[in-house]
Image: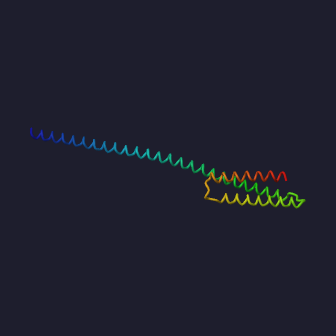
Amino acid sequence: MNRIATLTLALGFAAALQGCAITELQNDNASAEARIKSREAELAAEQRTQRDLVAQRDRLREDLARTEMNAAQLQAQLDRMSQANESTPVNTPRQRELRNQRAQQLSDAAKQAQALDRDATLSRQEKARQLQVLKDKTRKMLDVLLQG
């Protein structure tokens, strides 16, 4: 009987050890699943951040292109105004003086537009504000040209 009891006890220990091993494996598996879920959540957050950054980059590129286009449009308008000014008939010394003044103003505005376009130290908002001021000044010069 002693042998049967020892064998039964040994089998009981073996079963208990297997149960502990299974429990250990289950705990390891649960821990690994928790780490995977945590990493998946981190990955999803990083992907959202990446999408947000890409969208922000695209908006900034569009804003920059719009700012560059506005600067280019202003430059084109200044060129047209210069041509119109040059073709203005001059019959008196006063008219010649006014045309020369307008030519100088247009040249100054063109230089300012080029400087603004090249200035990397200005913020986008400040550049847009200064371009708007320059555009307003250009519109006023156009009005003077049309009246002259």
Residue in the foreground of this view, choosing between 28 and 124: 124
Q: Is residue 107 left or right of residue 42?
A: right
The image quarter containing residue 14 is top left
Residue 99 % position (x, y):
83, 59
Residue at image point 88% right, 61% down: 93
- Total marks placed: 0
Q: Residue furthest front?
A: 94
Q: Is residue 62 left or right of residue 33?
A: right
95 displayed left or right of 119 = right
Q: Nearer the viewer, residue 97 or 141?
A: 97
Quadrant where the N terminus lies? top left
**Farthest residue, direction left:** 1
Q: Is residue 25 above or below residue 70?
A: above
Nearer to me, 24 or 83 = 83
> Which quadrant of the view contains residue 110?
bottom right
Residue 80, image x, y percentages: 79, 56
Q: Residue at x 73, y 54 (%)?
A: 74
**Who's the residue at 88% across and 58% down the image?**
89
Q: Position of residue 60 (x, y in %)?
A: 60, 51
Colour logic: rainbow
Horizontal and vertical percent for residue 115?
Answer: 68, 60
